[in-house]
Image (cartoon, coloured by chain):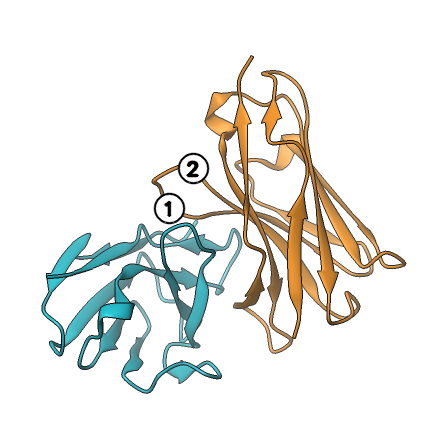
Chain colours: A orange, B cyan
Amino acid sequence: QVQLQESGPGLVKPSETLSLTCTVSGGSISSYYWSWIRQPPGKGLEWIGYIYYSGSTKYNPSLKSRVTTSVDTSKNQFSLNLNSVTAADTAVYHCAREARDGGYFDYWGQGTLVTVDS
Amino acid sequence: EIVLTQSPDFQSVTPKEKVTITCRASQSIGSNLHWYQQKPDQSPKLLINYASQSFSGVPSRFSGSGSGTDFTLTINSLEAEDAATYYCHQSRSFPLTFGGGTKVEIK
């Protein structure tokens, strides 16, 4: 059974960089697209972007100027960096796997709350 | 960007009742529409992919239909464990987008 687990600081100061890692267990990171999706408290879901195991990426234009992602296949991990954060970036951040036949997310991490506050 | 509009925002339903949730896309997305269930303090779980295909292990009371711009998620004979927020999601074009969610409460 594939499992995803997000990790990283739960508190980030305004203007700093939010950094999270997603560790994949029970399956290989290879041959899949891996996404980050966030959810402000009490609100809906926003797709941040994806990274393919080979390193190619695609981001939501609304966040593109502030987002970078990376993948480490040797550790079965992928990561998110979001710079210049503000309170509006406070959210639960989920990592998720896009299914092999494309389009939908078949496995999700439990999510991790990141609060932006001084 | 494709906007997905769900209705209703909230529904209070008696057990064994039928629930219908709709999702309307701002432009045609074919069958590239998926449904998720999210319970409090949990991550979303896939119910239906490509408008009408039930994901593995999903109870048969959940079904999906539609194509183009109008889609429906139906829960036949609602059970107490179905209390959750339901989201639609389109994968027709980037950026990937989600509907605003429909919260289903059990009376």
Where does the image place residue A85, in percent across and percent down from the top left? 59, 23
Q: Three-letter amino acid code at disc 2?
A: Pro
Residue at position x 66%, y 26% from top? A83
Give the quadrant of the N terminus of chain A: bottom right
Q: Nearer the viewer, residue B46 or A66?
A: B46
Q: Where in the figure is residue A65, as x and y percent of width and height?
A: 64, 31
Estimate the x, y position of residue A91 in percent, counting from the top left.
Answer: 48, 36
Q: What quarter of the picture does the C terminus of chain A occupy?
A: top right
Which of the labelled discs sits on residue A44, or is there none? 1
Is there CB contact under 8 Å for labels 2 and 1? no
- Residue A27 vs A35, above or below: the answer is below
Q: Residue at x 29, y 60 (%)?
A: B84
Q: Residue at x 26, y 63 (%)?
A: B83
Say what amino acid the circle numbered 1 marks: Gly
Relative placement, left or right, of A75 versus B42 is right
Name above or below for residue B29 compared with residue B11: below
State how many labels appear: 2
Viewer-proximal residue, A18 or B98? A18
Q: Which mark, residue B40?
A: none
- Would residue B92 be found to the left or right of residue A57 on screen? left
Task: Tell me the CA gap for discs 2 and 1.
Answer: 7 Å
Chain bearing tag 2 is: A
Q: Chain of mark 1?
A: A
Q: Position of residue B63 (x, y in %)?
A: 30, 81
Residue A40: assigned label? 2
Badge 1 crowding class, 10 Å Cα cut-off, few under 14, some 14 to 19, many 20 or more, is: some
